[in-house]
Each structure stands twice: as C-alpha cells, then as structure tokens.
Amino acid sequence: MTGSVHALIQGVVLGILTGGVYALMASGQTLIFGIMKVVNLAQGALVVLAAYLSYTLFTSFGLDPLLTIPLTTVIMFGLGVVIQLVFLRPLKREDSAQLSLLVTFAVALLLEGFMSVVWKTTYRSTNTDYANSSWTLLGIQFTVVRVIAFVLSLIALGLLFLLLNRTKFGRAVRATVQNPMSAELLGVESKRVAALGFGLGAATAAAAGSVYGLLYPFNSGSHYDLISELLSIVVLGGLGSVGGAVIAALIVSTSSAVVATVFSPTWSSFTFFVILILVLVLRPQGLYGTVERGAL
Amino acid sequence: MVRGGVFVAALVALPLLGFEHWVLNLMIFTLMYAAMSSAWNLVGGFAGYPSLGHAAFFGLGAYFVGIWFQHHDVVTGYEPFVILPLAGLIAAVVGFPIAWVAMRTRADVFAIVTITLLFVAQTLAFNLDSLTGGAQGLAMPTPPFELARFEWPFYYAMLWLLLTSMALTYLSMRSKVGLSLDAIRADEDKALGVGVHVQGVKVLAFSVSVALVAMAGGVWAYYETFTYPQFAFDPIITIGMVLMCFLGGRGTLWGPVIGAFILVPGQQYLAYRLGGSQFYLIAYAGVFLLIMLLMPRGILPTIADRLRRRRAIASSSGPPPSSDVPPPSSGAGTNVPVPSGGAA
Amino acid sequence: MTALLEVKGARKAFGGVHAVDDCSLNVEEGSITALIGPNGSGKTTLFNLITGYLKADGGEFRFRGRDVTGSDPGALYRQGLTRTFQQARVFPHMSVTENLVVAGAYRWRDLLVPRVLGRDRSRADALLEEFRMTHVAELPASELSYGQRKLLEFAAVLMSEPRLVLLDEPTAGVNPVMIDTMERHIRERHAAGVTFLVVEHDMQFVMRLCDPVVVLDNGKEIFSGPPTEVQQNPLVLDAYLGT
C-alpha cells in the first residue's frame, strides 16, 4: 500500500475504534438533553472522574479497569442522580431553562476542583500490561486497548439500547423525550425520569471513563477538551438523538484521526470545531435533530 | 445616580491617595474584572445568551497587543494604550461571524460554541508558535514608567474600560437596543414575530462585548509583560466574569461591578490565606451554585425586590408589582411546552 | 386578481404523521376568513407554516403576490403579515406601552433612539385608547388579566399597520364579555381595511363574523364557502362527527 493511503486507512481504523468510546460518552449526554432539555456540561468531568476512580482501583488494589466497570458504573449512576436532585431539581421553573446549563457548568468545575485536590494535577494513565501491545493486520496497526475499548463500548451501547427499548423505564424515557406533556398525562413521573435519566447519563460516562483512562493520559483539566469534543458530536448528531450521537461520534472521531495521521496531530483537535461550525451553518439541527423555533 | 457619581470620583482619585503598590495592583484586577463582567453582561445578562468562552477574546486582545509590539517600538510607554481600540475592533470583526453562526439557534448551542471556541483558541496559541511564541510565551516591552507611579497608567486604562463598558450598557438600556434585548430575553420567538431585529441585535451585543474584553486583555498583556497561552486563555477568566455578573445581578448596570468588587478582593484574600490555586476553583464553583440555587437573580435585583416589598407593605397598597429588572426567563429559543404539540 | 394570501400544496410531516397534507387555501383581501376543523386537522400547523414558525416540507406560499415560502416570522411581520398566539404571548416584564412600542417594526437606524420616543408614545396611546387600555399603560404586562393580555397582543401587532392578521383562537379561555370586545375590535379594524384569518373552535363566533369559512380535515382543506353552507355540507359533518 502506498504511504498516504496507508495513513488514511490507519486513520479510519483508529477513528472507528476511538469513535466507540466517544459514542458511549456522547449518547449519555444527548440522552440527558433529550429527557431534561439540559446540555450537561459536566459530562466530560464525569468521564474524567470515572477514569480517576478506575485508576485508583487499579493502582491501589490491582483491579483491572475493565473488571471494575460495573462498580464504577453503579457509583457514577448514584452520583448522577444525586447531582440532579441536589442541583437541578431545585431550580425554579422560570429560571431552569437558562440556569440548568450554567449549573452543570458549575458542577463540572466543582468536580474539577475536587479531582485536582484529591489527585493533584499530574497526568495519570491507567497502565495495564496490555496497554501498549498491538496487533498488526494487513499492515494496519490495531492497539489492543483500542480494540477492547471499541468492543466494550459496543456492549455498553447495546445494553443502553436494550434498556431504552425493552424496559418500562426505557419506554418512559423515550416518551418523555418525544413529548413530555403527553408522557406526564400518560402517567410517567417526569421528575423521577429526570433524576434516573441523569444517573443513566453519568453511568455511560463511567463505562467510558474506565476505558478513557486506558487510552489517554488525563488530569483534572482534561474535561475541557473532552466536553468540547462531546458537544460537537452531540450537535452534529442532533440534540436528543442517541442514534445520531453514535453516528456523529464515528464521523468526528474518524475525521480527527484521519487529519492526525494524514496531516498532523496538532490540527486534529480543530477538526471537531470545524465540523461544529459547518453543522451550524449548513444544518443546525444536526443529523437527526428537530428544527425548533420555540413554542408553537 | 449621585451615589454612582461619588463612587466613580472615588475611583478616579484613588491612586492619588498614596496607597501601597499591592493595593493598586488589586484594584487594577478588580477594575479589569468589573469591566469584563460588565461587558459579559451585554451578552449573558441582557441578551440572555451565556457565553462560556469570552476568555478567548481576552486572549485575542492580549496576543494582538503582544504581537503588534514585536514589530513596533514602545517609546513613550503609552503606545500600547493607543493601540487598544484597534484590538477591540479586531475582536469585534472576529466575533461578528462567530456570533452570527453561534446565535442562530438556541442559547445552549451558543454556549457550546463558546466553550469550544475557547479551547480552540488556546490550542491555536500553543501551536502557532512562530507567531505567538507557543508555550514559551510572548514578551511585551517593559513599560518605561517610573516605579513610584508604575501602576497608574494601567489603573486608569482599566478604569476607562470600566466606564466605557458601563456607558455602553447605560446607552443600551435607555435605547431601543435595550428594548429589543429585553424582548429577546423574555421571549425570543415572540420578539422575532413582532419584527424585532433579533439576530442583528444579538450579534451587535456580542461584538461590542468581546471588543471590550479584548481591550482588557491588551492592557493585561502589557501589565504582565509575559503572555502565556494557558493564562491568556484560562477558563477561570470566563468563570470569573460570569460569576461576578451573576452575583451582582445580570441585566443591571451596577450588578457586575458589585460582583467584581466583592469577588476579586475576596478571591485574593482566600488565595493569600489558603494558598493552593485548586481550592478556589471549588470555592468559585460553590459560590456559583449557591447563587443559582438561592439567589438566582443576584444581589441587586434581590435587594431591590425586598426594598420594594417593604415599601409596599409600609404604604399598604397591596402586593407590589414585580421588579423592573426582568429576570432572564425562558431564554432564547428554548422550548416552552405548549399543549398543542403539533397538529391542532 | 390574486388573493392576499395564497397557499398551494402545503405539506408538513412530523415523523410519520402528515399534519398538513397537500393543503391549499386563499385568503382574499378585505375578508375575515375562518379556518376551522376538528382536533388534529392541522390548523395550528398550517398557521405556523404560514407565519414562518415552521418550515414546510413542500408547497408554495404567496403574500401580496410575492413568494414568501420559507420566510421567517420577522420578515413576514415587516411585510404586513402578523399573528397572535393562542396563549397570548406578551413580554411580561415590560410595560404595556413598551409592549406596543417594541412591536412597532422600527428600523435599524432607530436602534440608538430612546426606548420610547414621543411619536412611539402617541401611536401607542392611540391604540391604547382604541382598546380602552389607557389606564394600564404603565403596568407591567404580567399584571394584566388573561383577557387583557389577549387584547394587548392584538393591539401590539396592529402597531406595524399590517395587511393581514392571523388570529390563533382569539376567544379561547376568555369570558363572553371579552369575546364581544374582541369581536368588536376585529370588526372595527376590518372596516379600516385589515384582512383576517382566524383559527377558531367557537362556531357561533365564526358564523357571526367570518366569510368565507375554510374547513380542514386530516391536513387537507375539504370545504371553503360561506358560513351558511358549512353546516349543511356532508363532508364537514363527516369530519366533525367522524366515521
């Protein structure tokens, strides 16, 4: 294979593999938006917190991060519910639309501050022994962790899909996303769905965070880059659409990776910004979002 | 009005009163944040679009001034101040298309773009190192001011920025710009429906706002001499602006100023006592959350409301009318659930 | 002669639901046209399409002979096509006078001008007098009763001297006295040359006031004619009583 084609394919592979993780993180975020109409600016911080948790479990107890995912997921789910109950629910009706955004932003900062106090600001990375090994197939390098991350994300997304489509809770969530008023009339308790939905969004961050720690070095400030990317993905996919978020994650991730391998890694961090602007100029509702013009 | 005049006069006279350098230094930062918070208020308070990336323009102004003086000389020491309006203009020109795209849909999407913008700006500053010096930073020529009154030019520059910002805010409030912004903030779609130039006014507010913030960045770059990407594009700058505006009262003239005058000295004091920078992130976030949960309209409107209530009870004229400072309500473009939901 | 408002083949679907399905109607200048239909017939969606709050999937919209398909509400307002909302949307923290002035379709160059100029005030005062609301001129709109808010909203859109006013259920949630008031104002304005398109459920109101009456069912217009004929028409009866 010629050099640049090879680089392109490598980039695409890399993008798809990482895309899975981002898809997982983004799906939680867009789900929260769908349920509560709130952009959760703390999603990145939740992922990083989960990364720290699995890192600590690994370095202190030698537990493989992949095995501790169920534990971190439960912890983060609880945290998500608490955050919603303590910080978001008390907001009064008239203020809630605008303030919720800023509240999640403040929560993100709170988490960042907390993490930097507990774990200091040195970069961490969960370095399991398989962290650096890779396979080579047809001249393309597949790092073991990325493949595992991808598979894991697929499993988690699959579970999420099952949850949303086969359980009573999932039905309640989907009803609330589609039409909150009708859902309430049909007996769905929107307050409970909101709290549990936020918990669910945080839970996806947990699974993603454990994997994130394996892939990238991180510190308390990493949530900024992460949230910027996640937000671009969610906008591209269409706010509120989980399927859209998954596809968008793959698109953004692949584009970034291709730009990194074909051009230079420094420019790959702009890819998502360029994509964000393009979406807003060409199709503001994203791939699967609805065009909204406010109350009708 | 009179109290305001006295306050301003006091600020003008302050350096003449012979305070120590650290006091003037503190005041420079207080005035800087007051000016920036007041500028942020135009977009986040009056228009109802919370920008979470204003620091991007602060850094833009800082780097513009820094880069300018890589190629020009500083002789009298006042050239950087003269160049400030140009920095403001550049920021407005850059901000205009960004605002146009970012403010088209809803306030949340706008916030998203601004956060992302800040991150991108910082990365650009790090990577375009031939222009910006990258991680090594950019050096400004040392200001040739006499040591005894070193802070004075910077102090008055920041004071001028604050007064400009407040003057623009006041003008806006009293003109149809303010009328339009009030309508946009209350019910943007209805405002559009009655012919308000919604997009134009929003973008105007944003452009003016970022111009002011960029000029502050320019003064800061000169004062600090060295400009580094992580400090010029520090999210803490945005957070500070936003928090101070919220604390004092969004959508008011004096709110951001009060917020700055409380928080900047407060934060300096905490830093002095507690040391480590990470705690004050928790403190900022904590204060922010407390305000939003307990006193979302900020100090000024809450006090105004209480006074009004007391006056109304005293004259027993029945329940008082709501405060004339409109709280930011359902916000731009967000969905207000309506029973019809589709076909009727 | 072309009608003031022409809608040809409008289409709008939400998911799989065709709220508006190849719908056409004309509003003649100088008429008070009614738009009625059972729940779910697509009236509100059509309304939103015409006034620019929703983008149509297909179809053509012409106002005053010009193609306005896809225009946004602000552009339409400034061309003389205005609307009120079912829930009477006003700006709650602004005074009644300011609510009127802000709807005055002022130009770009007027932006730096004081909030309420002398001439704004006189125009607003004239409307306030017409609507007998002078005594509440300086109250914040949030303190008005629901009926008063509906009147305010109606008065406000008249500030721009529109050609066509779309009224979204003007009598909904309003007491009978206010219904009379509303009717009177519509008639007065109509006599002064304003055309109306009214979505309504109150049949007696429609019968008294409107001609022609357009009936919508399942997103399509099924009848258009004088009110006396509406009640006899079998298609209309079918639509309302169901099969």
Image (spheres, grey):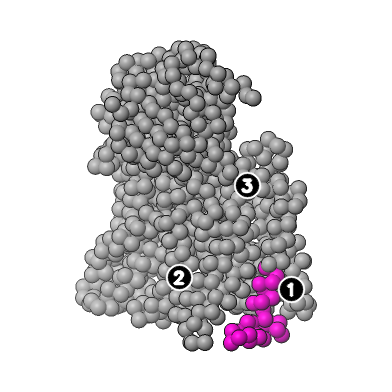
In this orientation, which residue lies closer to the viewer: A187 or B59? A187
In this orientation, which residue lies closer to the viewer: B333 or B229? B333
Residue at numbered disc 2: A270
Residue at 47% across / 76% down in the picture?
A259
User: Both on one chain, marks 1 and 3?
Assistant: yes
Residue range in magenta is A127-153
Image quadrant assignment for residue B83: bottom left
Of the two numbered discs 3 and 2 on the same chain, state the one appearing first in sequence.
3
Q: Is residue B211 left or right of residue C174?
A: left
Q: Chain of mark 1?
A: A
Of the two numbered discs 3 and 2 in the rendering, the one whose residue sits closer to the viewer: 3
User: Both on one chain, marks 3 and 2?
Assistant: yes
Q: Secondary structure at mark 2?
A: helix
- x, y (%) of residue A203? 70, 61
- x, y (%) of residue A265? 48, 79
Residue type for callout 1: Leu
Residue at numbered disc 1: A66
Residue type for callout 3: Val
- x, y (%) of residue B107? 47, 50
**Residue A101 to residue C191: above or below:** below
Q: Chain of mark 3?
A: A
Is residue A136 one of those drawn in magenta? yes
- Using the rendered image of the protein, determine whether residue A14 is visible from the camera's viewpoint: yes
* Alpha-carbon span between mark 3 and mark 2: 31 Å
Q: Secondary structure at mark 3?
A: helix
Q: Residues within 10 Å of mark 1 (few under 14, many from 20)?
A: some
- Using the rendered image of the protein, determine whether residue B243 is visible from the camera's viewpoint: no
For residue A177, which numbered disc appears in the image?
3
